[in-house]
Amino acid sequence: MKNLFLLATGTALLLAFSFCKNTPLPEGQTIVSDSTPLNTEPEQPLPMGKLDTLAGFKGCEKATWSPLTANSEEFIYQHYIVKITRDPKTPGEQITVLRDADRPNFVIPMPDAGAFKGVCKNKLFVDAGTGPDGRELFVYDVDNMTQIYNTRYYGDPEVVNAEKIYFLMPAEEGDVTRKPDCPEKEEWLKDGLRVGYGQRCIFNFTVRSLTRKSEWACVPLQ
């Protein structure tokens, strides 16, 4: 009985030792501990800055562009520096305007999925939306740190003479009093798109007035 007990004890110890013994990994495999970063690739160098960079809508001012990090950059204007940061996990941008003459910074109250669309004099533009249709335009007065206008729009807005912005305001087909020529309509429908209509409008920054022109345009919609 004593010999059997000793034999059983020895067998148990041998089995325990064999389980604790390191088992070699297949060739080419290594163990990665929790403290070892999985991504060990070196960070990519930032691109060089650029002078006379046109940012935003047509008619906006040029600026000096400078990358700050992989997810931030700045546009340097005569009286302002526009700093932009992005969170890779969420759409949209955060914008802070550094103003000269020791004036406080202006943190733009960004809409959801908003993005910087340029500066003209003391006006800053933001575009918002998660798709190509139904986008919104926001206009901010940087000197007075206020939002002065916002609207839905189609197409590509254009700043004219540094005092107005031209754009298409979405309109229902039944409200279009003068149907525009739309030579690409059949092609759009063939590609699975819809046809939308927009009224040409002008917003004047100085007097903050909106002019609706008796002109219409058709646009492709998803």
Image: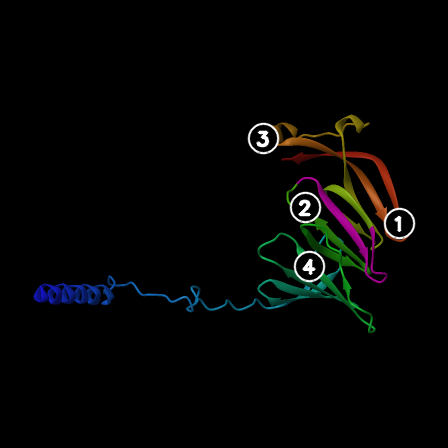
Q: Residue at x 85, y 37 (%)?
A: 213
Q: Earlier in the sequence, mark 3 or mark 1?
A: 3
Name the amino acid, label 3.
Answer: Gly
Q: Which residue is mark 1?
A: 208
Q: Tell which circle, 2 or 3, labels the residue nearer the N-terminal end.
A: 2
Q: Is residue 99 magenta?
A: no
Dot 2 and dot 4 residues touching (CB under 8 Å): no
Element at label 2: loop
Quarter of the image where the C terminus is located: top right
Q: Nearer the viewer, mark 4 or mark 1?
A: 4
Q: Based on the displayed image, in which of its 4 quarters is residue 100 positioned?
A: bottom right
Mark 4 and mark 3 lie on one chain; the one further toward the N terminus is 4
* Helix, strand or loop for the magenta stretch, by majority: strand
Please state the extent of the stretch shown in magenta in the rendering.
133-148
Circle 4 Cα neighbour tier, 10 Å, few/some/many (<14 / 14–19 / ≥20): some
| Nearer-the-camera pick, 180 or 120 | 120
Find residue 94 and name its label: 4
Say whether residue 143 is left or right of residue 184: right
